[in-house]
Amino acid sequence: MAKKRFPLPKRFSAALSEKAYEQLRALNEQYHYGNNYLLTIILENLDDVVDAKALDIAFAAFAEEYGAPAAGGMGKKS
């Protein structure tokens, strides 16, 4: 019996650092999902797969080095 296809209705273009892309490719090698599915699985299960404190530290370190975006930067399109 054929498996159901998981719908991915939202599409966007994303740029990644070399390190992030290497991680994504390593996950692809291990699990054989495309980039869109890998990102969906990670983000939909973020609370289960990531330590919240460690994530806060990673965002703080990134903001310290590169600056933080303005609040509300991902508002809904009209």
Image: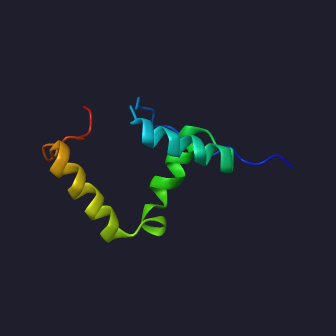
Q: Is residue 28 above or below residue 61?
A: above
Is residue 45 placed above or below 71 in the rendered structure?
below
Q: Position of residue 60 (x, y in %)?
A: 21, 57
Q: Look at 24% across and 50% down and name the residue there.
A: 62
In the rendered structure, the answer to whether residue 41 lies left or right of residue 54 reads right
Q: Give the farthest residue toward the top.
A: 13
Q: Position of residue 64 (x, y in %)?
A: 16, 51
Image location (x, y in percent) of residue 49: 48, 65
Q: Residue at x 14, y 47 (%)?
A: 71
Q: Is any part of residue 7 visible from this angle?
A: no
Q: Residue at x 43, y 35 (%)?
A: 18
Q: In this view of the protein, which residue sits in the foreground, 6 or 16? A: 16
Left or right of 55? Residue 41 is right
Q: How is the image coloured?
A: rainbow
Q: Quadrant of residue 78?
A: top left
Residue situated furthest right in the rendering: 1
The correct choice, above or below, for 51 with respect to 45 in the image is below
How many circles with numbers are drawn on the protein?
Answer: 0
Name which quarter of the figure residue 35 lies in. Answer: top right
Residue 17, quarter of picture:
top left
Would residue 53 be visible to someone looking at this image? yes
The residue positioned 13% from the left and 43% from the top of the image is 70
